[in-house]
Image (cartoon, grey):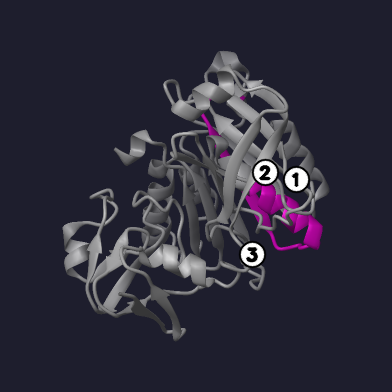
Amino acid sequence: MNFQVTVQPSGRVFSVERDETMLSAAIRAGVGLPYGCRDGACGSCKSRLLDGRVIHGAHQPKTLTEAEEAAGFVLTCCATPQTDCILEARTVAGVGEFPVLKLPSRVLSLEKPTADVAVLRLQLPATQNFQYHAGQYVEFILRDGARRSYSMANAPHSMPGFVELHIRHMPGGKFTDHVFGAMKEKDILRLEGPFGSFFLREDSDKPIILLGSGTGFAPLKAIIERIQHLGLTRPTTLYWGCRSKADLYLHDWAVEAAATTPGLSYIPVLSDAKPEDGWSGRTGFVHQAVMADLPDLSGHQVYACGVPVMVESAKVDFTANCGLPPEEFYADAFTSEADKQ
């Protein structure tokens, strides 16, 4: 039995098959619901159920609390309708614009700018026109069917037919141990995408804050390349938080981008900088550096990407203390398998 889901206020309607989640059906139908991890861990897909009944699959209790569920909120990525439903959710223009494809890719190059970060470049089949928005991600499909998600670090125009991914080594991780151990050039990897609603809202003229921690820099790099390609001059500030100077694995790229892109500034922030490191720049938590510089964010857009604790802290503090409208906070939390336990 299929159920109908009506999205308000857009009025979009899509059909959900038996035992299918709302989000999977929306992606299939090209309806642009907001989402991130698709695993019930990040909360980007949280919406309000106005009418109908759903059953939730596995998800993080902190992502959808009992109080929120009682108030009618659902996670569309793991909510399976049991009746026809009416869902209150903002639709995202551009999500669903490009087809989700499964395709093989060939390892073109694998570089390790630091001991625990790999820059992986993959060649895609010339016969398939893989399109995506700068900031979206792909999922690797492993041999056992498990999946691992990584954001494209290049804008589509910059390397047509190729994608660049930034991968942090998680010791003991099924996929990253392979990347840092056995992977070599010309290996074939299977992937699917594009996914996600994390990309630049180009119809706005608001100043932009790009907030990244660690390899959360990857989709922000792609967004900067998109800004450069379009010739946008919206004031844009990149805040990149890492532990040490060595962790700023593409620092020179960011410095060059800021020097050559009108309106772009770059502020690296180190949480564990020591005097002997010779670091004279900003220190502390990266989202607090934003608050120190911009106590009033009411007229800004924020694009935050990185570890969940940074993303969540930024969302709470920016909206509660700096006047950022909640709808102008766009996020992609990098949830590891450990985060999903």
Q: Quadrant of the N terminus?
A: bottom left
Q: Residue at x 69, y 59 (%)?
A: 235
Residue 229 among magenta residues: yes
Q: Nearer the viewer, residue 85 or 232?
A: 85
Mark 3 or 2, closer to the camera? 3
Say above or below: 263 vs 97: above
Q: Earlier in the sequence, mark 3 or mark 2?
A: 3
Which residue appears at 67% of the width and 32% of the height? 120
Residue 15 is labelled as: none
The alpha-carbon separation of the residues under discs 1 and 2 comes to 6 Å
218 over 227 or under it: above or below: above
What whole-number distance in Å separates the C-alpha atoms at marks 3 and 2?
Answer: 31 Å
Q: Secondary structure at mark 1?
A: helix
- Upstream in sequence: badge 1 or badge 2: 1
Q: What amino acid does circle 3 point to?
A: Phe
At numbered mark 3, what does the secondary structure look like: helix, strand or loop? Answer: loop
Q: Is residue 257 above or below residue 303?
A: above
**For mark 3, what is the residue?**
98
Query: Reading the chain from its start, which is encountered first: label 1 or label 3?
Result: 3
Query: Marks 1 and 2: CB-CB under 8 Å?
Result: yes
Q: Is residue 282 visible?
A: no
Residue highlighted by disc 1 = 258
Image vertical order of residue 101 relative to residue 119, above or below: below
Q: Which residues are magenta?
A: 220-245
Structural crowding at the residue carrying mark 3, measured as other residues with C-alpha within 10 Å and reported as few (<14), some (14–19) or many (≥20): some
Front disc: 1 or 3: 3
Query: For the image shown, how many numbered marks are present on the structure?
Result: 3
Task: Give the labeled residue for mark 2.
Answer: 266
Please identify the residue farthest to the front as the structure is shown.
Answer: 1
Residue shown at the point (61%, 53%) measured from the top left: 135
**Residue located farthest toward the top when viewing the structure as drawn:** 276
